[in-house]
Image (cartoon, rainbow, N blue to C red):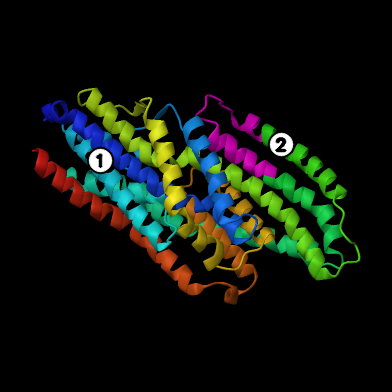
Amino acid sequence: MVEVLVTYGPWLIAAAALFGFLMAFGVGANDVANAMGTSVGSGALTIKQAIIIAMVFEFAGAYLAGGEVTNTIRKGIIDGAHFADTPELLVYGFISALLAAGIWLIAASYLGWPVSTTHSIIGAIIGFAAVGVGMDAVNWAKVAGIVGSWVVTPAISGFIAFVIFQSAQKLIFDTDSPFNNAKRYVPFYMALAAFVMSLVTIKKGLKHVGLHFDNMEAYGLAILAATVVGMLGKVAINRMKFDQQADRHTQFANVEKVFALLMVVTACCMAFAHGSNDVANAIGPLAAVVTIVSHGGDIPDKAPLAWWILPLGAFGIVLGLALLGKRVIATIGNKITHLTPSRGFAAELAAASTVVIASGTGLPISTTQTLVGAVLGVGMARGIAALNLGVVRNIVISWVVTLPAGAALSIVFFQLIRITLQ
């Protein structure tokens, strides 16, 4: 049936491009809250400022560092060898998966649910593979690891956020002189943030640009960045003039201004790293379709990117963010728990730290679930009453539904395409 790819090749590529753009739109609408939700919720940025900043850094990450090649099969979820004799089914499947995941992400974004874009496309891929070839085509061990990450990832980030927030409370806010202690300890938080964000950017953002660093070099650069930022931060904070005799409430407000500035920087780094990494959820299947069709049915392990694919994905992310991103940003920033800049900083730093840990250990991870877990950790530090449990319940349900929803939609679209073209 390879002749189907020859006959309908241009139409299949056009459909994949359209649905790849739809998927990228969903990624921008939903996942951008990972970088900007806490900044908006804490008041460090307005929603308009956050969207403009995120548009710049998400686009830069996706376009500049999105990669020259991408894995044909995202995350090793299915075995391409099962499609060796029927490559057209893999093409139909990727097109179906992009449409299914894109629709689910847009629906979830409209409802304000922060779901995993990675899990959306994985669920869709599982659906068409299980139906199109058989259950053996799916790597169920990988799927089990992903399901396990629903608990492990938020737990790790939540614990780290809890520790960071509690340390700030003990060292700064619960003292007799909050601003003096902020001048003493905030440079260390700045250095820690620089260290983690440097690692995130190097490991998630720069590996596609042709800048390859081994672990020793990556950690060396991160330590250098931490040292420089910590020293500059100390100089900058020491130059800040505030009334030492001001009441505690005013001192708290002054300390929060320092954390607000930190949050803007961390948000920019997270947006760049996210754009470079998660654009592959949209362009990976698209690149695979283009490669398989143009090679007459051959299924390579890696798919080179045509010149137009990265800009398509980058523009889709930015458009989705601009048109629909504020709904999920509102959920992350305002509806789970009340955030201040110091709390938001703790959540953002915890999420970034968890991403670094996952990168080093191979733990399957969702940046969305990582950040939600971190925000929950900050809320838990203030007591269970500080959390909106109704919103938390809806978020957890949306996580559980994402894989089967993507799979079910993908199966329907896959069968429709197969019936239409065969």
Is 176 or 302 nearer to us in this picture?
A: 176
Mark 2: amino acid: Ala
Label 1, on which residue? 95
Q: Position of residue 271 (x, y in %)?
A: 54, 44
Point out the residue furthest to the bottom here. 385
The residue located at (78%, 65%) in the rendering is 252
Where is 27 relative to 221, above or below? below
Relative to 386, 225 lies left or right: right
Where is 138 relative to 294, above or below? below
Q: Does residue 400 appear in the picture of this structure?
A: yes
Mark 1: amino acid: Ile
User: Residue 225: which disc?
Assistant: 2
Q: Tell me how far mark 2 sits from mark 1, CA to CA.
A: 42 Å
Is-magenta flag for residue 76? no
Relative to 57, 296 lies left or right: left
Q: Secondary structure at mark 2?
A: helix
Q: Secondary structure at mark 1?
A: helix
Q: Main secondary structure of the magenta part?
A: helix
Q: Position of residue 101 (x, y in %)?
A: 32, 49
The residue located at (35%, 45%) in the rendering is 23
Q: Hey, which quadrant is residue 22 in on the image?
A: top left
Q: Give the quarter of the figure containing the C terminus.
A: top left
Magenta residues, start to end: 194-219
* Crowding near the residue tagged with mark 1, few <14, some 14–19, many ≥20 C-alpha atoms within 10 Å: many
Is-magenta flag for residue 213? yes
Given contact means CB atoms under 8 Å apart, are the residues at marks 2 and 1 in contact?
Answer: no
